[in-house]
Image: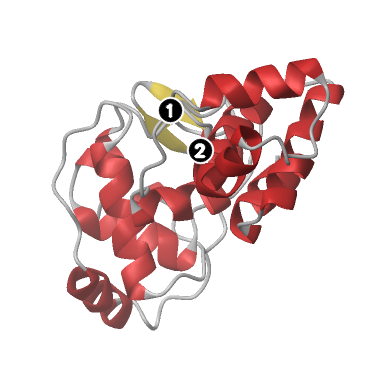
Amino acid sequence: VEAIVACSHVGTVAAAVVAVQALAAPRDRFIDYALAQTLRALQPQWAPALADGSLAVHDPDQLALLRRSLGTVAEAPHPGRLVYESLCLNCHQADGRGLAGIYPPLAASEWVTGPTRPLARILLHGLGGRITVAGGTYGVQVPLPMPPMGLNDRQMADVLTYVRSAFGNQAGAVTADEVATERAASAAHVGAWTAEDLVK
């Protein structure tokens, strides 16, 4: 998945040729998702080469995938989506539903659609311990803490805005100023937050 996503950042015809090599290996829905998004992002580079016959792809399955991809329109993704796909997707998944008992969902999460203060603090300092999300409990049998993300105020605002409006969520945007306020207010905090601390 990481190799395919990396191809999308290269922005060349050769990157698309490399990405479609994923069809020769075992795949799952996460690889298929990453491949589809990468081909959409690189379409301005590889589509002309496919049209004029200069694209160095000869495998029938790879060519068929590229031709199907032509029906999709490359669009500028939400900046928060880019952050999500590079840092959050592996745990919280492409559909925002997480992994049962391990990583909590962002879809239909009261934490995501609620006040922005706890969300900002989780991204700033991380989260550990037990947490209940959408009726499920996480961090008990498999205590995998969420690390701090190391993002700047703009990146944090973008990804929080994205998850609050994606996966069926319908919550308002988060501004970089709001994030900056929480960064300053929690500057003295050491270590990961717990759910109990965040609701005080």
Q: Quadrant of the N terminus?
A: top right
Q: Which mark is residue 40?
A: 2
- For marks 1 and 2, the one nearer the N-term is 2
The answer to whether residue 188 shows anywhere in this view is yes
Amino acid marked by disc 2: Arg
Residue 180 position (above or below residue 50): below
Instruction: Check the image and name the residue furthest to the right.
Output: 25
Structural distance between the alpha carbons of marks 1 and 2: 7 Å
**Which residue is located at x 51 percent, y 62 percent?**
192
Q: Which residue is disc 1 drawn over?
A: 72
Q: Is residue 170 left or right of residue 96?
A: left
Amino acid marked by disc 1: Thr
Disc 1, disc 2: CB below 8 Å? yes
How many discs appear? 2
**Which residue is located at x 57 percent, y 42 percent?**
48
Q: Is residue 91 left or right of residue 111?
A: right
Secondary structure category for the residue under label 2: helix
Task: State the image coordinates of residue 55 (x, y, percent, origin top left).
Answer: 73, 39
